Image (cartoon, rainbow, N blue to C red):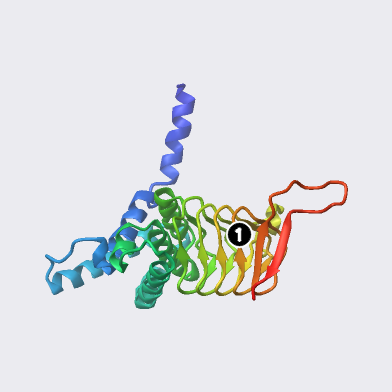
């Protein structure tokens, strides 16, 4: 390495002296999740006063992380207070997600097993907390939290996506939920599902680029649903490996026949059935 290169890299460290590291942000999330869900950690040895002290420490930790984020200067205490005021509601939402996973997976033995071992629970919980920070205008921390969960579970949920209650992720590895995705209540998705965007220019990043999934939809493994105008009607079932870039009406059942694309008559493999 040359001296010029070393000076260049050293200068980058001087610019980012106060940025919170991803490790610090991830530690905050894990401590908060553990404090709220007894199945996820061991805090039984703490007195009630010590537990209250732990929650106060977590608020101080978030304060410190926000103070290190330049975009949050000037409103740190308000953001921290608003976030922790929302924690009881987030907790209830996550409990509903646990119910959705438990009822949606016949293999789940009990709720404790879901909390202690299911990657879907961990990724959804990370999203719920990150989404609240996103709603409060925090920019970097939410993405760090969900990307940390992504690295541990293989489930990539953007913090700005809008997801309803009782969200069930079964298995989970390879799932992608894009930034402008809207998911209704009681939706169940399996591994390797992509709710993504058709390719757009950078200047169109603010438009809705990802699909809308209405209530009580099931999406099986390997399905790819793209586009901001694509709406999957409520009660629909999307079969495995389906590729969709257009909307389907409520109570549709979508799957591909096992036959090759016919270039002569422009026929596709797409089959749509109404659910009786």
Secondary structure beneath label 1: loop
In the image, is residue 151 above or below residue 34? above
Badge 1: residue crowd in 10 Å (few <14, some 14–19, many ≥20): some
Q: Which residue is drawn at the image coordinates 88% and 47% (left, top)? A: 264
- Determine which quarter of the picture holds residue 64: bottom left
Q: How many marks?
A: 1
- Determine which quarter of the picture holds residue 80: bottom left
Q: Which residue is drawn at the image coordinates 30% and 62% (left, top)? A: 113
State left or right for residue 226 relative to residue 124. Answer: right
User: Quadrant of the image for the N terminus?
Assistant: top left
In the image, is residue 222 above or below residue 1? below
Q: Is residue 81 visible?
A: no
Q: Which residue is drawn at the image coordinates 37% and 61% (left, top)? A: 107
Q: What percent of the width, then of the height, locates residue 20?
A: 38, 52
Q: Is residue 96 visible?
A: yes
Q: What percent of the width, then of the height, locates residue 246?
A: 72, 63
- The residue where tag 1 is placed is 239
- 40 or 207, nearer to the observer: 40
- 16 or 143, nearer to the observer: 143
Q: What percent of the width, then of the height, locates residue 235?
A: 59, 74
């Amino acid at each position: 390495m040359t001296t010029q290169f070393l000076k260049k890299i050293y200068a980058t460290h001087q610019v980012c002296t106060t940025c919170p590291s991803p490790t610090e942000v991830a530690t905050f999330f894990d401590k908060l999740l553990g404090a709220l869900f007894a199945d996820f950690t061991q805090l039984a040895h703490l007195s009630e006063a010590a537990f209250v002290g732990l929650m106060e420490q977590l608020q101080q930790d978030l304060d410190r992380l926000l103070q290190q984020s330049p975009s949050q200067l000037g409103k740190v205490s308000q953001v921290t207070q608003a976030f922790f005021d929302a924690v009881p509601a987030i907790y209830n939402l996550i409990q509903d997600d646990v119910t959705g996973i438990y009822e949606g997976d016949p293999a789940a033995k009990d709720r404790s097993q879901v909390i202690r071992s299911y990657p879907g629970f961990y990724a959804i919980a990370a999203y719920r907390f990150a989404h609240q920070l996103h709603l409060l205008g925090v920019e970097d921390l939410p993405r760090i939290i969900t990307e940390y969960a992504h690295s541990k579970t293989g489930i990539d949920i953007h913090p700005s996506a809008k997801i309803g209650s009782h969200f069930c992720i079964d298995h989970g590895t390879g799932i992608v939920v894009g930034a402008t995705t809207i998911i209704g209540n009681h939706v169940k998705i399996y591994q390797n599902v992509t709710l993504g965007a058709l390719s757009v220019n950078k200047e169109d990043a603010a438009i809705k680029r990802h699909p809308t999934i209405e209530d009580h939809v099931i999406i099986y493994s390997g399905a790819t649903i793209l586009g901001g105008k694509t709406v999957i009607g409520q009660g629909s079932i999307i079969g495995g490996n389906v590729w969709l870039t257009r909307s389907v009406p409520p109570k549709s059942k979508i799957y591909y026949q096992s036959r090759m694309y016919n270039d002569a008559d422009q026929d596709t493999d797409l089959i749509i059935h109404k659910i009786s």
